[in-house]
Image (spheres, rainbow, N blue to C red):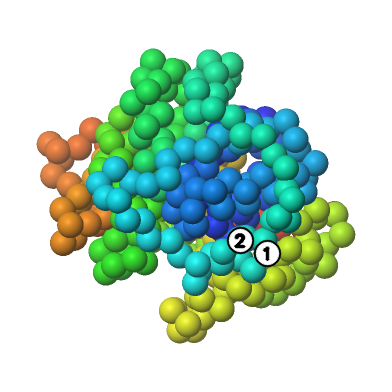
Amino acid sequence: TKKILLFCDPGIDDSLAIMYTMLDPELELVGIVTGYGNVTIDQATANAAYLLQLAGKYDIPIIPGASKPVQQEEVSFYPEIHGEGIGPIQPPSDLQYQIYPFDTIRLIIERYRNELIIVDTGRSTTLATAFILFPEQIKMVHSFYVMGGAFFVPGNVTAMAEANFFGDPTSSNFVLKFAHNLTITPLNVTQFAILTPEVAEAISENERNIYASMIAPVFEFYYEFYKESVPGIPGAPIHDLLTIMLVKNPTIVDYIYYDAKVVEDIEVKGMSYIDFRPTSNTGETRIAVNLHYEAFLEEFSKVMLPE
Ligand code: BDR
Ligand code: CA
């Protein structure tokens, strides 16, 4: 099994990524590190805890990370896209869960070392902080998968910027610079990882999917937003789920190998770019550029529609 430490801000597509990981026997979630982003850090943490408890997993550590980016005090949240809970679903108000201190990240890395894969589907602040606090341990990690950026296409926060890299571009740059064995799943690919109403309905009717009863309301909420903002879109993109899917199924996308950077200046904050000059690149970062939708759907259905 692939051992994953997930940094995330659930968030609907982060939540779907967590569900997917819980349901795929070949993926093992060894910890969830939550951060601000789609929702507040407290909400993200409660949402993650709720999803783990629904799966009966009480032993996966939940580690709260950053509550704000490095550059500024104010944080934008996105309730119109992700709701105030998991879409319209609030974790029970009496939900009990244990949270673990930040140092648990170090312990998890030391335990799994070269077997550990770090996936970051949220703002980059928390992961950058782990890089700063645990530099020696970070070197032991097998590989990194980061959802963020938008190459050759418009962003989803501004014309130039995608939400994860817009949220804290300084931290994103830090991660892009220092993460080894890095795969980036940017918006230009994740925007095509569409969950359609038909497939969502099939999941909600699947008795073997433990999350079935949540899928319809959560999907509906999420799709409502996308219908408004992207006229004619046939479903809702599940950016973060695609990112985690690549850990096991790298060939459902094509890649180019370049280093990516993020613009930190406030006027064009969060814009991601590649310096294509051959002398400016080590070519060590794997950037997804094209999604094979049929292969994606097949893999998605295999896990989310268990027989
Ligand atoms: C990314 O931003 C968040 O809103 C989503 O959860 C995803 O990680 C897409 O731009
Ligand atoms: Ca996310």
Residue 120 place in picture, x, y as percent: 47, 42
Q: Is mark 1 within 8 Å of ligand 1?
A: no
Nearer to me, 192 or 97: 97
Question: Left of 164 or right of it: where is 57?
Answer: right
Taking the spot 46% from the left edge, 30% from the top edge, the residue there is: 143
* Left or right position of 155 against 212: left
Label 2 sits on a secondary structure element that is: loop
Q: Quadrant of residue 136?
A: top left
Q: Nearer the viewer, residue 179 or 130?
A: 130
Q: Is residue 238 left or right of residue 211?
A: left
Q: CA distance from mark 2 to mark 1?
A: 5 Å
Instruction: Provide residue 278's location: percent of width, then percent of height.
Output: 15, 40
Instruction: Determine if residue 122 is in view.
Output: no
User: In which quadrant will I find the N terminus?
Assistant: top right
Task: Give the percent coordinates (x, y) of residue 44.
Answer: 55, 50
Local SS, label 1:
loop
| Residue type of the residue flagged with mark 1 | Ile
As drawn, 133 above or below 207: above
Please give the name of the residue rendered at 37% of the width and 47% of the height, measured from the top-left corner.
68
Quadrant for the C terminus in the image: bottom right
* Residue at image coords 56%, 53%: 43
Does the numbered disc 2 mark a residue whose Cβ is under 8 Å from ligand 1?
no
Callout 2–callout 1 Cβ contact below 8 Å: yes
What's the residue type where badge 2 is placed?
Gly
Mark 1 = which residue? Answer: 89
Q: Residue 258: x percent and y percent?
A: 27, 42
Which residue in the protein does label 2 denote?
Answer: 85
Numbered marks: total: 2
**Crowd around label 1: few <14 · some 14–19 · many ≥20 (10 Å):** some
Q: Residues within 10 Å of mark 2 (few under 14, many from 20)?
A: many
Q: Extreme front residue here? A: 94
